[in-house]
Amino acid sequence: MSENMIEVHNISAEEQAACQCWDLWESGDVSEFAYDYDQDVQFIVQQGEAVIHTQFGDSVAIAPGNRVIIRAGVSGRWDIAAPIVNRYAYL
């Protein structure tokens, strides 16, 4: 069941400021990669754009200003349109 396996919300300026102490992740020059999520993670997109495809057939577009939560058990394939920079934290 894929319901609520990936959640995307727009963030406030306060949330953007608060996440700056989270770990930094950058995609670099890759245009696609796959990742199996073994624990819940949240991240806030700082730069870039991508579409995350799941094994359930869902596709979620992400862009700067989005807070994304990906639940454990998701196998995701990222199609990156513009290099991604995220601040992330495990839940």
Image: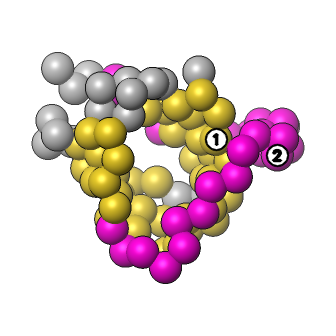
Task: Report which quarter residue 36 is drawn in.
Answer: top left
Tag 2: amino acid = Gln
Residue 91 lies left or right of residue 4; in this view the side is right
* Mark 1, residue position: 88
Q: Residue at x 70, y 52 (%)?
A: 24
Q: Is residue 85 above or below residue 72?
A: below
Q: Residue at x 31, y 54 (%)?
A: 34
Dot 1: element = strand
Comparing 41 with 46, the one in front is 41
Residue 10 shows in the view:
no
Assign the C terminus to one quadrant of the image. top right
- Crowding near pointer 1: few (<14 within 10 Å), some, many (20+)? many
* Mark 2, residue position: 20
**Upstream in the sequence, badge 2 or badge 1?**
2
Q: Does the stretch in magenta take in 24?
A: yes
Q: Residue at x 37, y 74 (%)?
A: 31
Q: Residue 8 at x, y = what percent?
A: 48, 38
Residue 37 shows in the view:
yes
